[in-house]
């Protein structure tokens, strides 16, 4: 059964909170994270981006854009790294192709 996102038009785009401080995360992805049980940046520290991406596809009842996985990778890196590399705070630098081209990039962000 397809589940609707937590966002409702009557919410007028809310929330605006700590998750929107994460690079690449705006209101839409904030709602995705909330639907996945992620409420705070700290909740991302033990999260696995691949698992979040797969769970969201199941939750929505359809495949999600692959770029969302790259945003999740970036978000987990941001949450787990005290002194992040500015280039790794750009979600597009977490694409599969860039990671294959640069094997020295973290495979498990922040670890």
Image (cartoon, rainbow, N blue to C red):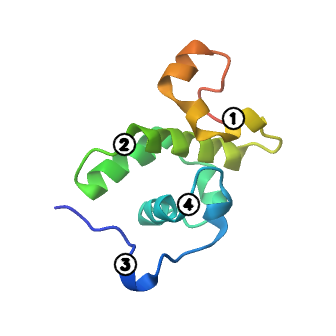
Q: Are marks 1 and 2 in contact (CB under 8 Å)?
A: no
The residues bearing labels 1 and 2 have C-alpha atoms spaced at a distance of 20 Å
Q: Earlier in the sequence, mark 1 or mark 2?
A: 2
Q: Earlier in the sequence, mark 3 or mark 2?
A: 3
Quadrant location of the C terminus in the rendered image: top right
Task: Check disc 3 and report its element: helix, strand or loop.
Answer: loop
Q: Residue at x 36, y 52 (%)?
A: 56
The residues bearing labels 3 and 2 have C-alpha atoms spaced at a distance of 21 Å
Q: Which residue is mark 3?
A: 8
Residue 82 image position (x, y, % from top left): 81, 45
**Image position of 7 (left or right of 103):** left
**Image position of 57 (left or right of 29):** left
- Residue 88, numbered label: 1
Quadrant location of the N terminus in the rendered image: bottom left
Residue 86 image position (x, y, % from top left): 77, 38
Q: Earlier in the sequence, mark 2 or mark 4?
A: 4
């Amino acid at each position: 059964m397809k589940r609707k996102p937590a966002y409702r038009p009557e919410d007028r785009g809310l929330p605006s909170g700590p998750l929107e401080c994460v690079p690449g995360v705006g209101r839409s992805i904030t709602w995705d994270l909330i639907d996945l049980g992620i409420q705070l940046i700290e909740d991302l520290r033990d999260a696995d981006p691949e698992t979040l991406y797969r769970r969201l596809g199941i939750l929505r009842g359809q495949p999600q854009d692959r770029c969302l996985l790259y945003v999740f990778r970036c978000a987990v890196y941001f949450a787990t790294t005290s002194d992040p590399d500015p280039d790794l705070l750009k979600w597009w630098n977490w694409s599969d192709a860039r990671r294959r081209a640069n094997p020295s990039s973290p495979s498990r962000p922040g670890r």
